[in-house]
Image (cartoon, rainbow, N blue to C red):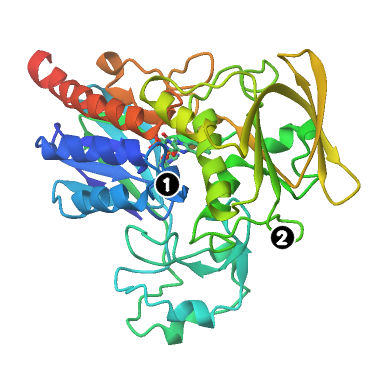
Amino acid sequence: MTEQSAGPRGTILVVGGGISGLTAAIEAAEAGSEVFLVEKSATLGGRVARMYRYFPKLCPPFCGLEITLKRVRTNPQIRVLTLAEVTSIQGEPGDLEVQIQIAPRYVNDRCTACGDCVAACPAERSDELNYGLGSTKAIYLPMKLSYPPRYVIDRAACPSGCEKCVPVCAPKAIELDMKPQNLTLRVGSVVVATGWQPYDASKLAELGFGEHKDVITNVMMERLAAPDGPTQGRITRPSDGKPPAHVTFVQCAGSRDEKHLPYCSAVCCLASLKQATYVREQLPDAQVRMLYIDVRTPGRYEDFYTRVDADPNIVLSRGKVARVTDAGNGKLLVRAEDTLAGTPLELETDLVVLATGMQRAGLGALEGTIETDGAGFLTPDYRRSGIRATGCARRPGDVMSSAEDATGAALHAMQACQRRQVHG
Ligand SMILES: Cc1cc2nc3c(=O)[nH]c(=O)nc-3n(C[C@H](O)[C@H](O)[C@H](O)COP(=O)(O)OP(=O)(O)OC[C@H]3O[C@@H](n4cnc5c(N)ncnc54)[C@H](O)[C@@H]3O)c2cc1C
């Protein structure tokens, strides 16, 4: 089905519903623009919704996110499309035609998120929210604070012919014959806020990811610590479910390395320091070691570094990790070079956390149509194209710098809308 929609020329399309896209949408709408906010997944929130806590305050992301989502929900100038992807952008600043594909959710807006369907569902699927740690039913709520607050069905996970969720849904919200939709929008400018994805740790064979269950990544650690995560917030070893007595963080896992990501992702040191506090708070006797090339905690984050470093159970050592192997006694053996002393360093540990960096997320059908820098981040000239990239799609960074950049992107998008009206 194709639906035609012609918005006014001043309309802004924001692609990506993470903190950057949400900020750009809210700022533009509150300044008077009509905004379409297009999100690929089934819920707004992006990667920050999957964190346990935020540095430096160590508050749960849901505090800020709840207010942000309320501003979206209550603003009539913002129209949200989830499970939606942009397939093409044509035209010039002030007059762009955009094609959007919307995948079926199989659950309509009568859903009250009661969860009765989950009990009836016989099928399981790998839980992408938890980076593959654990599973959900084929019908699931994308996350605790989902927006829209509605279930979604992964039809690929449904057993053939199964309709068990349909009769138990009192509000009759399940529509198994829902079809994909196409939408054409006329907008003045586009903000691309499609964010980041973790670097693929399976490319780091020498660091043991995939081979040893107790080698995990930093994003997995966030989910292990989160109360709505696969272990209900208990930090345990994936291999035996026991709490680790010793945890090692391997910094720059694939980052600042020409063979993998040649750049620094700007947040990994802070993320590991933050995660060290998760371990210490929950397991008071645990020892933490962080092996770094150099610790990067610029500006106001220096205080956070100093605070965490003051804990005698958290030891920061300058060392480049060469290998992680099985120590043969149920532990892992980390081999590194102590780059201060110039000597080899070997230590046994229960859990290794790889501080993998941020890579720009893929753009689907738009891939290759928007200019990038040498590291793959998006650098379109908004004056020429009407497209402004923002947040971690533009450069890796923390929430504060992403949100600040998104505010600037909203202004640039509004200016780009006016270009044709003023000059054209
Ligand atoms: C381990 C780790 C811990 C971190 N902890 C903190 C912290 O404590 N404090 C802090 O300040 N920062 C932290 N960060 C950084 C933080 O995650 C980023 O600053 C933040 O996620 C940037 O938000 P974003 O909206 O730019 O991108 P994202 O959060 O990636 O959001 C992008 C959104 O776009 C959607 N999308 C992707 N592709 C498409 C498409 N083609 N079409 C439509 N939608 C699409 C995605 O589904 C997603 O919803 C951490 C980073 C890491 C790696």
Question: Which residue is tagged 1?
Answer: 40
Label 1 sits on what residue type?
Answer: Lys
Q: Quadrant of the C terminus?
A: top left
Answer with the quarter of the image where residue 151 lies: bottom left
Which secondary structure, mark 2?
Answer: loop
Task: Count residues near mark 2 (Cα–Cα under 10 Å), then give few for <14, some for 14-19, many for 20+.
Answer: few
First-in-chain label (2 vs 1) = 1
Q: Amino acid at mark 2?
A: Lys
- Say which of 94 and 383 sits in front: 383
Instruction: Reply above or below: 319 against 332.
Output: above
- Name the quadrant containing residue 171: bottom left
Is the residue marked by circle 1 packed among few (<14), some (14-19), or many (20+) residues within 10 Å? many
Q: Nearer the viewer, residue 247 or 162?
A: 247
Is residue 359 visible in the rendered image? The answer is no
Question: Image point 62% across, 40% down: which residue?
Answer: 313
Where does the image place residue 160, in percent across and percent down from the top left? 63, 74
In this rendering, the label closer to the viewer, 2 or 1: 2
Left or right: where does residue 396 sit relative to residue 13?
right
How much space separates mark 2 and mark 1, taking CA atoms?
Answer: 36 Å
Left or right position of 395 against 13: right
- Which mark, residue 226? none
Q: Which residue is mark 2?
A: 242
Is the CB of the residue bearing disc 1 within 8 angstroms of ligand 1? yes
